[in-house]
Image (spheres, rainbow, N blue to C red):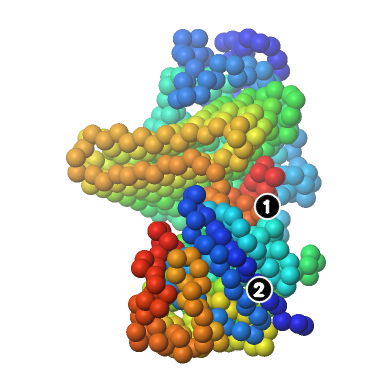
Amino acid sequence: MANSTLEIKDLHVEIEGQEILKGVNLTINGGEFHAVMGPNGTGKSTLASAIMGHPNYEVTKGQVLLDGEDVLEMEVDERAKAGLFLAMQYPSEISGVTTSDFLRSSINAQREEGDEISLMKFIKEMDGAMDYLEMDKNMAQRYLNEGFSGGEKKRNEILQLMMLKPEIAILDEIDSGLDIDALKVVSKGINKLRDEQFGCLIITHYQRLLDYITPDKVHVMMQGRVVKSGGPELAQRLEAEGYDWIKKELGIEDETVGQKA
Amino acid sequence: MTVETKLPYDQQYVRSFSEKRNEPQWMQDLRQQALDLVETLENPKPDKTSIKRWNFHDFKHDVGGETINQLSDLPSDIQVFLDMEDSNENLVIQRNQSVAYQSLSKDLTDKGVILTDIQTALDKHGDLVQRYYMKDAVQIDEHKFTALHTALMNGGVFVYVPKNVQVEEPLQAIFWQEDNQAASFNHVIVVAEENSSLTYVENYVSHNKEEHAVANIVTEVIAHDNAQINFGSVDNFSEGTTVYVNRRGVAYRDAKIEWNLGQMNDGNTVSENITHLIGDNSYSYAKTVAVGRGDQSQNYTAKISHYGKQSEGYILQHGVMKDSASSIFNGVGKIEHGATKSNAEQESRVLMLSKNARGDANPILLIDEDDVTAGHAASVGRVDPVQLYYLMSRGISQKEAERLIIHGFLAPVVNEIPIKAVRDQLTEVIERKVY
């Protein structure tokens, strides 16, 4: 199967009438890991949410294409079925729906009717992935994200990622609020998916995560745009020197877009 | 067997009805006393719901039903409430107002447990019934409906668990209104003596769409010192039936009453669920889920009154409203003077699925004591678009995502129903009503 390609072209996005993204261009090919970095409030999470179709974000201009198909015309569930996945920074809590039931519904939603995953196979896969992520098995029977700690929510997002096996995944600040041990486990889960086909867009403002997941490309966002791109060495320089040199180089005084991303 | 606009039930009718059932004298007298009160008392006035135009007169009062020899003779829509592969040893099935089937295991019978229809109970355990009937929980003169109920009581069950007896398996009652006009004036009494425990589950079913009927149900649940009662119900009267259902609990010292009520009627309904926490350290958790559809109007009151010290009362009401249905959810936590260190908590949430539906959640705390804790949460709203987005972002369709959220919203009661068949049936009724 040919690799998928996610193209983001001149993307402009508003939230409550305020423009947050002001023309983002990025292309992610299957098999590549991209990191999008930048200080808080520069539009990184908005990019992730707009691509997935969060109801509070309005795309005012530009395109998002997955293998040439217009993602922005798709319903949220169709985006997922087309091969996109977003590990969310703040996943919703859904009372009364167990994590396990939700996962099974998600897997079955992506399969043909009559070809649902068998319960045995599902449990085996879920147990395997939970072991890999060093998760407490009881979590499967707890209500989705309800009462989960920050770290449990992140692991649960990666659990879903591992089980749904998308073509292209976006990870929105998957490292925030994780201690170093949890960060290692979550990274291990993501790295397990790394192959010739799988594309990943990792949004973070710490270089720390990139010590465990080496990106092929690194992009810096400021003022709602990608202002600089490079290889892994760019992330290391940001870690060592911060963002000020980029601002100086580009003549930017305030890197934010007026609202936290 | 009368269908008229004015209630035709006079002293003579009530007397002959009682005589026909060979009731004890005290019951005959009580019926007469109540009938006199019917004339003088007013209808109840449920908060924010007008019941003036509801049908309370068009029904058949005296309708029997045949017995069945075995459970497999039941029609499939009644069988679904039974775990057919189980022995179903502890079960009463009432057909209209007659007993169609009843069974109680030898073990429980030997321990002195009673599970029988109210008529048999009056005959065989008259003194016990008299001790509890309209005494400590519900009063005959509360309003016209309680008086009318007492005058016309025509069915129900009596459940009694003696001191120190723990009943592990659920006791089940099915009230099958087979006749489309048969009224249910059911009286249910559940008594757990000191240090005993029981689980009771009841189902009400009718199928009348066009024909009118009335249900006027009183249920009295008494938990003596250190007793535990787990009470589950699924009410599923059809749209032709107007329902008044009053479920009242009394908990003495260290006693515990849990209510799990699935309120799935399709007709106009007034439901009161009140628990009196009389004893110190008594406890009640009252959970209700309701679904409204069509143009039905419903009024739910969940109330817990604290009298005992360190008594704990929790109320949870979750309702889903669609079409033009309207519902009022009153949650009342009342702490009486002297009930120190008590805790009254409540949560009422209404999910609106259409713009013509109406739902009100009214949290009320009435507190006459300083040294207590209390809290409430109430909300009325639509399915959260961010929750939908989250589920859909995993490929789940909008319809399925809404379904998951709604079932999850109603899960607090559904998951607590102790008989699997009844639980599955409740899930199916919800599915049918919501979609």
Q: Badge 1 local density, few (<14 within 10 Å), some, or many (20+)?
A: few
Q: Residue at x 39, y 83 (%)?
A: A238
Image quarter (top left, top right, bottom left or bottom right) of the C terminus of chain A: bottom left
Pointer 2 residue: A6
Q: Is residue B47 left or right of residue B91?
A: left
Going by the image, does B376 lie left or right of B143? left
Q: Which chain does tag 1 point to?
A: B
Q: Circle 2: is it few (<14), some (14-19), or many (20+) Cα within 10 Å? A: many
For this rendering, which residue is in front, B340 or B289?
Answer: B289
Q: Closest to the observer: A33 or A114?
A: A33
State the residue in front, A180 or B114. Answer: A180
Quickly name the residue at label 1: B399
| Residue A128, placed above or below residue B221 | below
Q: Position of residue A56 (x, y in %)?
A: 53, 53
A35 is higher (above) or lower (below) than B228: below
Q: Tell me what residue is drawn at x 60 percent, y 19 percent.
A: B54
- Relative to A14, say whether B215 is above or below: above
x and y, in percent, of residue B157 in the image: 57, 38
